[in-house]
Image (cartoon, grey):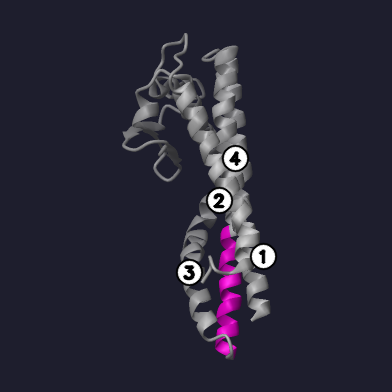
Amino acid sequence: MLFFDPLYLLLIGPAMLFAVWAQFRTMSAYTRYSRVGTQARLTGAQAARRLLDADGLRDVQIERIPGRLTDHYDPRTRILRLSEGVHDSQSIAAIGIAAHEMGHALQHAAAYKPLVFRQGFYPVASFASRAWIWLFLIGAGLAASPMGRTLMLAAVICLSLYAFFALVTLPVEFDASRRALLVLETSRTLDGEELSGARKVLGAAALTYVASAVQAVLMVVWLILRSQRR
């Protein structure tokens, strides 16, 4: 239904290509700089621990988790979870990614408003991201009835909530990278070309969040046009 809609292909097709390109850039930068070690000879976990302790966040725990680029900070449990390739590696990529996740811990400690809002809004966005497609499908089947129009409107609202969440995520991620690079530089954990490499890794990763936000917003535009057309 979606992929045979010319309007969908026109709006979402370029966004999907952008997302694929952003993912390619991220994996290319990660692969390149995961092969380059640092003078500090610290693993991602060791670097994160040192930086957290230096900022007085000794109560934040670090855990090793399976997967590739599954790294994240959980503000509910105050646990920084690092993937195998980041936790145990002494590479520029590993330290850059670990520092980025530590940046989220710094945001949490400082009650950074966009992070606090995103954390509270997440349950709503998570529900909306799953609900909109069912509302759309049922509403499309009942398009000629008032109920169908109501369901389509509900689908637009749900998808808009998810798109709003994706937009709120952007300043949170950009700020975490900014904090990470600043801490890496001031602590001299990375220097010169090493810091430049970490900046490239985090910059490429940021593109994936931009692509996700663009795709979500264009999906809302498509859904509004689709519902009006019906």
Q: What number is the disc on residue 207?
A: 4
Give the image location of residue 41, x and y in percent.
Answer: 41, 11
Q: Residues within 10 Å of mark 2 (few under 14, many from 20)?
A: some
For marks 4 and 2, give the one nearer the viewer: 4
Residue beneath disc 2: 118
Side of 211 relative to 32 (left or right): right
Helix, strand or loop at label 4? It is helix
Give, as a three-letter code, the residue at label 3: Ala
From the viewer's side, name the closer residue of 77 and 137.
137
Q: Of the residues under marks 4 and 2, which one precedes in the sequence?
A: 2
Answer whether labels 3 and 1 touch (C-beta < 8 Å): no
Q: Distance between the residues labelled 4 and 2?
A: 19 Å
| Location of residue 106 by image quarter | top right
Q: Earlier in the sequence, mark 4 or mark 3?
A: 3
Q: Say which element carries label 2.
A: helix
- Camera-side residue: 142 or 183? 142
Q: Give the range drawn in magenta.
A: 146-162
Residue at which label 1 appears: 221
- Pick whichever of labels 4 and 1 is earlier in the sequence: 4
**Cα–Cα span, label 2 and label 1:** 23 Å
